[in-house]
Image (spheres, rainbow, N blue to C red):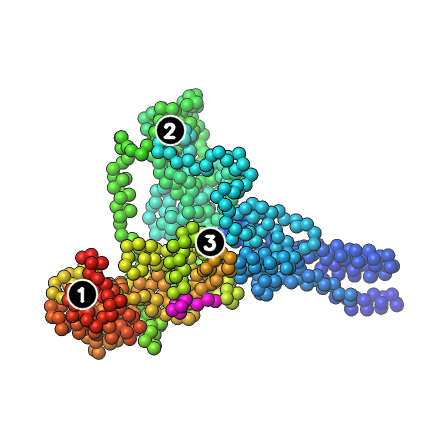
Amino acid sequence: MEDTDRKSAIARRAYYKGAITKQKAKLQQENLNLASAEMLKLKEAKLIKIYARALALESSNVRDNTVKDREVNMRAGSTLQVSQAKTTHVAVDASCNFCGKSEHKVFNCPKFTLASYKERIAFVNSKQLCKICLNSHKNKCKYHFKCQICKLGHNTLIHNSEQVPSQHQSSGPQRKATNNHSEETVALLSGTNNCGQVLLPTAKVELVSRGGSKIIVKALLDSASQSSFITSKLAKQLGKPLVPNKTGVIGIANTSKTISQAITTEVYSCAYPYKVTVNCLVTDAITAKLPQCGFSLADLNIPNNIKLADDTCNDPSEIDILLGADIFFQTLLPQSEELTRHHRDAAQPRLVHTQFGYILAGNLPEFSHGNSAVSLFCRDCKTDLNSTMKQFWQSESVPQEFTEHESEKVQCEEHFQKTVKLENKQFEVSIPLKVPIYDINNYIGDSLSLALKRFLNLEKKLHNDPSLFKEYKSFIDEYIDLGHASSVDISQYDLNKDPIYFIPHHAVLKPDAVSTKLRVVMDAGMKGSNKMSLNDLMLTGPVIQADMFDILLRFRVHKYFFLCDIRRMYRNILITPEQRSLQNILWRDSPQEPISCLQLQTVSYGLRSSSFLATRCLYELAIRYKDEFPLGSKAILQSSYVDDIVQSHNDLDTIINIKRQLIDLLSLGSFNLHKWCANNSAILSDIPTEKQQHSDELEF
């Protein structure tokens, strides 16, 4: 009876979890002696170690692809506390030691990533972190990561990117034997350009878009691929939904790439009544044009009754879809005896019967392609004239506007009217988004890593050209000094939840310009990790201003004229504070400094809606004050094109009055005019000289 009561009391008091507590309860119930208790401690320690490793592996995360560390960082520094009481607890510290936040670790910390090399290496040394996995552990690191830049045994995040290698310094053991040869050879005349002699199997297939239209493309049949692929261009034409599908693709020489989206579509044969459903991974490009060199089908011994799966297999063409081994072997049909006799010639390619028709693949005969010398001049032009003219007009064509339905233009206009503010002589506008701002992060994904990579490449370019760096830095400094950008602590952002977008930037040079020779342009078209950009989620808006042809016609018919330019028109318009987190750029004055996050406060070049917002503010100003400034309002509505105003009139006093009203009207929106030019000095009599532009600097 006493034994029963004692066991019941133990069962009521015990609170055990997992494998550790079960083992301990079992030993206690068996009333083991002191030796068994010692064994219990050893088993507890072993189980705790296994459990801690499982927790660390479960909470580990793979670094972003753009940094390309491929780190499966284990949180080995987790603290384990085992109480002396009967209940055993295991606690894991998953917070970041650098910024103190709990939702990420050091190797995923944006503040640590943007810190300077000296700050990062000093932190790693002070915390005695492993230089491979960036965690804290006593024993040798079990991981063998290498720096993706220098290939040495440390984490890429602590690579000394500030160290500039000498031009004569060898970058690795592979160059020791090539001291007498340069890496690149420049020649005015090469030897021969040998085209490949192996023809890969292709077939013309038919796909049906979401709207029901038929699309015929060329497919590559690859019996050595475990997956099928489709180009993003073709996937967009199909209009079918893309499914998230993060897949690693390994190619020749163990090269790898991660593809994050897939699409399911039906592929139809153009030769037989056959269709197959294919799940394709979406990639920007599959391969080069195939075949690499054209040839004549007449040079091949192809029977007349054979229907080729690709009747243009001899012409180099784009490959829009690749069908993998699972599809390839499904499409094979029995081969005829006639073809078996035909294949006795080893120099001829093989014909294989498939559901898509007969595919042609294998060796090409020597006479079907020749060796062509590559020269700086052309004696016999064999390029197709139609193709050449098409490329010419494509390169010279004016960039097309973003396609937008009429309803979206109306929606954009309504959004502007509801959100625009004019306070203290300054406009504040809201970016017209297609989706709610709180959902931006779900559409775009990570943009910091890609923007950081773009910035580091820009930084190298700038420091290789000191004069360009000086102008670029001056532009950024002016941006900050005028209050058009402000520095923010990146640790204030929750990159996983907050609507955040980092915009890469680059320089646009105009050496012949009189005033602004360099302009920094933002690239809001950069796609994040989810293959969406900020521009993709933004409305373009309708065209507000008059057509340039009409403006020039009105300008040319009168006797007196003046021209002027609105200084910093875009940057005089504020963006509503709730949306400024969508306009972040990276910058630092020196590679030795940490990278700063600058939040742009105004309308910026490179955003899809910027042109509409800026010109719509001018239109709004003219409408609001048309009764007070009728001549100035009319000049804005009829004679302005983007930030340029060209005005003419037959009466000198009238055009002077137009100028004065225009200055007063635009000042109500903090718009200042400069670069004044006129054909009569009386028009510019009250304009300061520094704001005038001489006529010899203009071209009419």
For the residue carrying disc 1, how many other residues have a C-alpha within 10 Å: few (<14), some (14-19), or many (20+)? many
Frontmost residue, 676 versus 429: 676
Q: Are marks 2 and 3 in contact (CB under 8 Å)?
A: no
Picture quarter containing residue 346?
top left
Quarter holding the C terminus is bottom left
Mark 1 or mark 2: which comes first in sequence? Answer: 2
Distance CA(mark 1)–CA(mark 2): 61 Å
Residue shown at the point (34%, 25%) measured from the top left: 299
Magenta stretch: residue 482 in it?
Answer: yes
Distance, label 2 to label 3, CA atoms, is 39 Å
Give, as a three-letter code, the residue at label 1.
Ala
Which residue position is annotated with label 3?
Answer: 456
* Direction from residue 631 to residue 135 in the image, left or right: right
Neighbourhood count class around disc 3 (C-alpha, 10 Å): few under 14, some 14–19, many 20 upward: some
What percent of the width, then of the height, locates residue 381?
A: 27, 33
Tag 3 secondary structure: helix
Query: Residue at coordinates 82% horizontally, 61% vertically from top-left?
Result: 28
Mark 2 or 3: in front is 3
Observer-nearest of 628 and 88: 628
> Would you call the spot at circle 2 few (<14 residues within 10 Å), some (14-19), or many (20 or more)?
few
Question: Residue placed at 42% from the left, 57% from the top?
Answer: 504
* Residue ID for mark 1: 678
3 or 1: tag closer to the N-terminus: 3
What is the quadrant of the N terminus in the image? Answer: bottom right
